[in-house]
Image (cartoon, grey):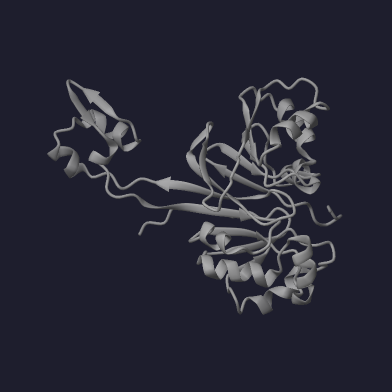
Amino acid sequence: MPLEERYLTSLMVRYNGHCLLIDCGEGTQLAIRKCGWGFKAIDAILFTHFHADHIAGLPGLLLTIGNSDRIKPLFIYGPPGIRSIVQGLCMICGGLPYEVYVCELNIKDNNGQIFNIENIPDLEISALKVDHRICCYAYSINLKRAGKFDANRAKLKNIPIKYWSRLQKGEIIKDSGNIWQPEDVLGKPRKGIKVTYCTDTRPIPDIAQFAQSSDLFICEGMYGDDEKLQSAIEKKHMLFSEAAKLAKNAQVKELWLTHYSPSVDDPQEYIPKIKNIFPNIIAGDNGMKKEINFIDE
């Protein structure tokens, strides 16, 4: 539940003028305002599942986006049933000045599903079904990075200089019977950026594989006290220590804990103990931000 000093869990990813929001519980738009961010650039919303603390803030957010003069379509993704739930919530929104397109992700096995958002084609999104009381998905956001431009290769293939920039940007060039591909002038792909978001689940092994090598792994930690294990099992949630073990097995760079039980007054008090499992762990807090950049190998 939202507390006076603690908002509900959600994540906003901002990239190249676009915004991607994961979950939208009560008060999410207030949290966005406090971060100093606008609403017009939100291109897509991904929902993990349909419990109220993850979706009840949607009608207000849709209205606020409408008041931002947005006219481009908004895309919403989530588990089966998302379409009827969004339709129901939109009944109290009135007429919106933009289209809302809803896509149901129907993941039936542990292999997950990969998809792209129409408005943000550079981002590759992966979804994985996790272990909660209702159908719930974790998401990984991958920003791919092409290889370096190789002028020598372009020269050897007699590619005119005027096409180099377009090939570097991923365009296929056809000219006078010649066809040149971006791979003709680019080296092997470089390491991109990966952010994984996982909440409302037991710590199944598939999550570690799904989050493998993430630059940032944001994971639920419902309880800090290991003695709460039975409650975590019954409610299909995680202990701080279980999230730390997933981060260790996934070999992520950094772990942020989130989605605390209201009974956890001070998440920070449990962190020193679980640093023995995974050192680079941070107790998430309202409005936490991180800028992640490409790293040259």
Q: Is 234 left or right of 129, judged from the image as shown?
A: right
Give whichever of 283, 135 is nearer the camera.
135
Which residue lies at the image location 72% right of the left edge and 26% below the top edge? 66
Count of marks overlaid on the render: 0
Which residue lies at the image location 17% right of the left edge and 44% below the top edge? 152
Residue found at the far front of this picture: 108
Which residue lies at the image location 24% right of the left edge and 24% below the top edge? 174
Q: Is 160 left or right of 108, judged from the image as shown?
A: left
Which residue lies at the image location 73% right of the left edge and 74% below the top edge? 270
Residue 292 seen in the current view: no
Tell me where residue 95 sits by quadrant. Answer: top right
**Vertical arrangement, residue 109 with respect to residue 232, above or below:** above
**Vertical arrangement, residue 149 with respect to residue 70, above or below:** below
Return the x and y of residue 155 as percentages of the image width and height: 15, 38
Return the x and y of residue 218 as percentages of the image width and height: 62, 58
**Vertical arrangement, residue 127 with respect to residue 269, above or below:** above
Q: Is 176 left or right of 267, judged from the image as shown?
A: left
Residue 115 seen in the current view: yes
Return the x and y of residue 156 as percentages of the image width and height: 13, 40
**Vertical arrangement, residue 50 with respect to residue 9, above or below:** above
Return the x and y of residue 190 as percentages of the image width and height: 36, 52
Tell me where residue 183 sits by quadrant. Answer: top left
Q: Quadrant of the C terminus?
A: bottom left
